[in-house]
Image (tube, grey):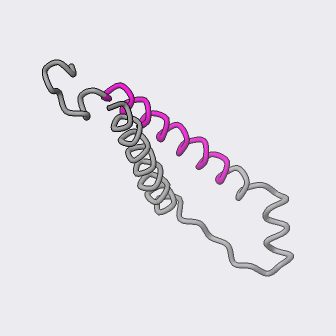
Amino acid sequence: MELFGAPFWIKGAALFKIAIIDSFIAIIITLGLIYFITNSIIFESIINELNINFKINYLQEFGILFIVSFAISLISSIIVVMSKK
């Protein structure tokens, strides 16, 4: 690909695909852990004992995690592809 002057987006296409898939896997694992911990009996007893009103918006948290993980994956992939020059 370098012979024909392909842009770095095409050169690192596999790297970008792997980074995006890894981001989705990390989001799913993180949300699963957050859901499990916030619905555990121990966590609820601690929150009740401290008199804290705790409600979590899972859709908003998913959006934030998606944006952050996607940005980190893209930036790191771009750095790797550009450093190969």
**Residue in view at x 32 percent, y 32 percent:** 85
| Towards the viewer: 4 or 47 | 4
Which residue sits at x=83%, y=78%?
A: 50
The residue furthest front is: 85
Q: Would you place residue 50 above or below residue 78 in this image?
A: below
Question: In x, y percent, where is residue 20?
Answer: 41, 37
Which residue occupies 65% across, 52% down?
A: 35
| Helix, strand or loop for the magenta stretch, by majority | helix
The answer to whether 61 is drawn above or below residue 23 in the figure is below
Q: Which residues are magenta?
A: 12-35
Q: Percent position (x, y) of residue 54?
A: 67, 73
Residue at the (39%, 47%) spot, across then down: 75
Q: Is residue 59 left or right of residue 51?
A: left
Please state which of residues 70 and 2 is positioned toward the viewer in this rendering.
2
The image shows residue 36, relative to residue 17, as above or below, that is below
Residue 47, x across and y down, in percent: 79, 71
Residue 45, magenta (yes or no)? no
16 left or right, relative to 9: right
Q: Pinpoint residue 7: horizontal percent, then vertical percent.
A: 19, 33
- What residue occupies the far bottom of the structure in this picture? 51
Residue closest to the eye, 71 or 40: 71
Image quarter where the N terminus lies is top left
Q: Residue 51's quadrant in the figure?
A: bottom right
Taking 4 as reference, is 32 above or below it? below
